[in-house]
Image (tube, coloured by chain):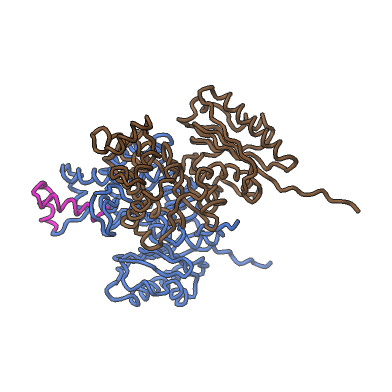
Chain colours: A blue, B brown
Amino acid sequence: MVRMPAVLPYYSIGVDLGGTNLRIAAVGPAGELCEKIALETEVKEGRERVVEDMCAAIADLRLRMGAAPLAGIGIGVPGVIHLSTGMVLNSPNLPGWTDFPVRDEIERRLATRVILENDANAAALGEKYLGAGKNVSGLCILTLGTGIGGGLVLDGRIWHGEDGMGGELGHMTIDPNGQLCACGNLGCIEAYSSASAIVRMANAAIRVGRSPGLTAAAEEVGELTAEVVYIKARQGDRVACEIFEMAGRSLGVAVGNLINIFNLPLYVIGGGVARAWDVFAPALIAEVEKRSVVYRSRRPRIERSALDADAGLLGAAWLPQLDRARLQTAPARQSL
Amino acid sequence: MVRMPAVLPYYSIGVDLGGTNLRIAAVGPAGELCEKIALETEVKEGRERVVEDMCAAIADLRLRMGAAPLAGIGIGVPGVIHLSTGMVLNSPNLPGWTDFPVRDEIERRLATRVILENDANAAALGEKYLGAGKNVSGLCILTLGTGIGGGLVLDGRIWHGEDGMGGELGHMTIDPNGQLCACGNLGCIEAYSSASAIVRMANAAIRVGRSPGLTAAAEEVGELTAEVVYIKARQGDRVACEIFEMAGRSLGVAVGNLINIFNLPLYVIGGGVARAWDVFAPALIAEVEKRSVVYRSRRPRIERSALDADAGLLGAAWLPQLDRARLQTAPARQSL
């Protein structure tokens, strides 16, 4: 009797290449996490060092996965990706990466197919296929970190727009005469609901002597973080609560606009700040209710990320699996 | 020798069913206007009268088109369309139409396939296939009329969203503490850049005695319209110019947001107010430049409607032609 070789299910590797953390995971065909490596991104040591670390970790994971066939590697990058060339067009967190053929170089070193994707887009994909959005056709995610990223999955595919810059949701103007944003505009949502915005508001309250609680916390930890402000809010500190209410209300204006524009079934809030969901979500929902005529009529879901910090990592790992399923992540162009 | 019958090209009929005007056109296979009928919409006479007028005009057009085969009838309606049932869900301009199977009733009376679509969506489709967007894959339109409508064509198809309410762009909040809008929200773009908003701003200036020019014009015409304010602006009236600058700047905030969100190649301004393009466009473009990081990088086109008042009519007529080309106007749902 001839024994048939066992058909091993394909696995894929995802990379979450952040400005601070470099995380690599192997993910099975049902989206299950098999192996994970967490490193620091040695940005200061230069691009070559980061690429070397990444390739070494990927090689390590492949060894650990043994004989299982690899579907490919997906890499989530904090910047705008030029899809056809696989280059990073604009990435404040990865200086020196913009004139470098990232995808081709890693493909060459690893002799495997590599798919590059913006990190928030990868998070959107992770939530769609492995997280909060499993049973919907599309969703919108806002990732609240140092800045605010955005990702759109429409009819199962990432919306890239014409040049890969679609889904730049963090720079939506929600108050035309509001706070100055890092992008130069006044009143971007990023200037109200990002971790940096929360820290800025807390420091402003400390400066004018409005918050003894935050002042004491800042003295204790040396430098305020959004997490510290969250802990104070949880302890009932009035100013800390107000800061998260402001972040939530501002987010509500943006989410209300997105609901009117897209009429999607699900809006996801991800990124580190989403862990403060309990202190900002009530203000967020109340504001959406007030603002959005489509929300009042259709009541779409507004939820925090189900995959939390792993959304981008798992989404990146899912890119080659989607590709195997003959799905284009780029929108199909129709010629008529 | 057997003579083959001449193959006649299919034509289609479009209806622009407005709260004031009812226009019906026959359009050839290249989008050329063949015949046109313009009536008043006798809304006050009741729904039955309007349906009768529409069906009579369509029958008239069919007679005029002779033996050419009809591909179908597309009707643009100012309201939210429930796609699967062909009913109008919400239409302030057509009272009494919401519990009525519009599509099925007209199909029954005319024994022909009928496609219903929201009027701004029809205008977006008209611009995409027969107007400013012929050579792009997608576009976004804002139609500035009594209110502000919105339409999105993504990858050649109208974006309907989950329940047909996608593209509700007129109620984007652009100033969270701004003008009260008819929808109950504060600071919708409709409260700044619609014809009603322009008239409201002009009347406010007259009330406080700020504008002798507009006061004289209002006395002359009896009731101010956006067109009268435009004529005064063209004559150099300072307050009239300021009103259109305000409308343009506000529109710029909204268009800047849409550019960041979609990264489309083309944004079209349509509707009656678009005829005042020369007096509001400079402020619109300047504001987009200031606001949108994606605009500064990609410089997408921002243009006034090429089809002007006919965008919705021609787009409605194009619905059956698109359908014949086996294109779905509803987004394809992917199950994975």
- Tell whether B67 sits left or right of A53: right
* Closer-to-camera residue (A216/A207): A207
Identify which residue, B268 or B234, lies in the foreground: B234
Q: Residue furthest top?
A: B45
Relative placement, left or right, of A5 versus B62 is left
Counting from the top left corner in percent of width and height, residue A7 is at 58, 64
Magenta stretch containing residue A208, yes or no?
A: yes
Q: Which is nearer the eye, A64 or B299?
A: B299
Q: Above or below — where is A120 with respect to B42? A: below
Magenta span main SS:
helix
Q: Quick one: which residue is furthest to the right in this view? A: B1
Residue B101 location, x and y as percent?
Answer: 58, 29
x and y percentages locating residue B306 in the rendered image: 50, 50
Is residue B83 depicted above or below B291 in this figure?
above
Left or right of B315? Residue B67 is right
Q: Indicate the quadrant containing the C terminus of chain A: top left, top right, bottom left or bottom right.
A: bottom right
- Where residue A54 sits in the image (x, y, percent)? 38, 71
Instruction: Check residue B114 for magenta coloring.
Output: no
The residue drawn where x is 38% and y is 55% is: B260
> Which of A134/B193 is in front?
B193
Side (left or right) of B186 relative to B89: left
Residue range in magenta is: A194-221
Residue B189, placed above or below residue B90: below
